[in-house]
């Protein structure tokens, strides 16, 4: 599926293609064929192929954000559903002492939203562009109609939310371990998947510039602790400095480190 504003249409439209979610380039969107006017209650525009395109007249906005720009803060973003189209988005919570901790690093094709305030306890999260990013924004009031008309979108959203739930459960487990290096290892693994470049020696370079303070902000720690933990991971062969604000990692060693720490925690609980 892909979200696109079609040239010549009076209102934004949601274009859904199957299969492939909306993994399309800007060039592909701009080169897409024009669509004829739709009836008052539009249905899918079908062809004989399995890749038939369905067009929905739903208000969809696509916005671009530069690196570090806030998409929404704790007091905003409600009433909308967001879909990362390109780039990466950092979703995080600010702690009472001013530190922050990542809830997720969101890659293209990921759905996210602000916390629901129905119980009055949610303090709200912040979403910001980790790198230059493009995000589609769908009014939550229209989401049910869009999902009803597009089983493919519904399946993709379920997949995305299942992944988000897994990430949050993993974060809770890492917080229970009370070992900063575990959260650091997990974050480096995520960054290596999103920004990794293989090196000749088998390590993976993270192409996103990262200061120790940036990493501390991601895992709810401080710069001094992150520096110490990076040195420990370096001694294990899990991390290597490539120069100023540049790291290479061994994903296999990082994963083994995080798993070993979790197993130690489980043994302590049993004892």
Image (tube, grey):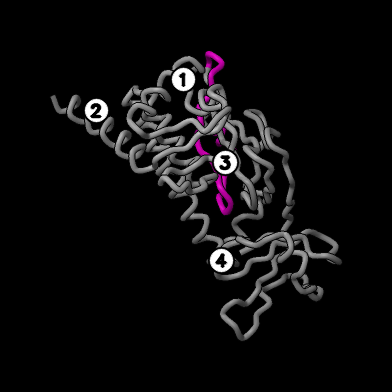
| Mark 1 or mark 2, whichever is nearer to me | 1
* In-image side of 185 versus 244 (left or right): left
| Mark 4 or mark 3, whichever is nearer to me | 3
Mark 2 = which residue?
265
Under circle 4, the secondary element is loop
**Label 2: few (<14), some (14–19) or many (≥20) C-alpha neighbours in 10 Å:** some
Q: Which mark is residue 207?
A: 3
Q: Earlier in the sequence, mark 4 or mark 3?
A: 4
Q: Earlier in the sequence, mark 4 or mark 2?
A: 4
Q: Is residue 242 visible?
A: yes
Mark 4 = which residue?
20
Q: Position of residue 165 (x, y in %)?
A: 43, 43
Q: Position of residue 61 (x, y in %)?
A: 74, 51
* In-image side of 35 versus 114 (left or right): right
- Mark 3–mark 2 Cα distance, whole angstroms, equals 33 Å
Q: Which mark is residue 70?
A: none
Q: Nearer the viewer, residue 15 or 231?
A: 231
């Amino acid at each position: 599926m892909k979200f696109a504003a079609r040239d010549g249409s009076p209102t934004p439209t949601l274009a859904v293609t199957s299969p492939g979610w909306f993994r399309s380039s800007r060039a592909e969107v701009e080169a897409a064929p024009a669509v004829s006017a739709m009836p008052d209650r539009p249905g899918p525009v079908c062809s004989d192929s399995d890749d038939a395109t369905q067009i929905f007249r739903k208000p969809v906005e696509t916005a671009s954000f530069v690196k570090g720009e806030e998409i929404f803060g704790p007091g905003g973003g409600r009433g909308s559903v967001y879909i990362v189209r390109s780039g990466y988005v950092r979703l995080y919570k600010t702690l009472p002492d001013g530190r922050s901790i990542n809830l997720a690093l969101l890659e293209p094709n990921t759905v996210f939203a602000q916390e629901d305030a129905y119980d009055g306890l949610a303090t709200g999260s912040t979403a910001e562009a980790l790198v230059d990013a493009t995000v589609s924004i769908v009014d939550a009031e229209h989401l049910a109609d869009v999902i009803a008309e597009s089983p493919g979108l519904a399946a993709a959203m379920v997949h995305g939310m299942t992944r988000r739930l897994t990430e949050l459960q993993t974060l809770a487990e890492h917080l229970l371990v009370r070992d900063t290096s575990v959260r650091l290892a997990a974050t480096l693994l995520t960054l290596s998947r999103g920004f990794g470049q293989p090196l000749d020696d088998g390590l993976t370079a993270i192409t996103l510039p990262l200061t120790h303070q940036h990493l501390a902000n991601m895992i709810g720690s401080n710069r001094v602790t992150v520096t110490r933990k990076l040195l420990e991971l370096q001694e294990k062969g899990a991390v290597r400095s490539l120069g100023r604000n540049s790291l290479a990692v061994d994903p296999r060693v990082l994963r083994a480190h995080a798993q070993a720490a979790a197993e130690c925690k489980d043994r302590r609980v049993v004892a």
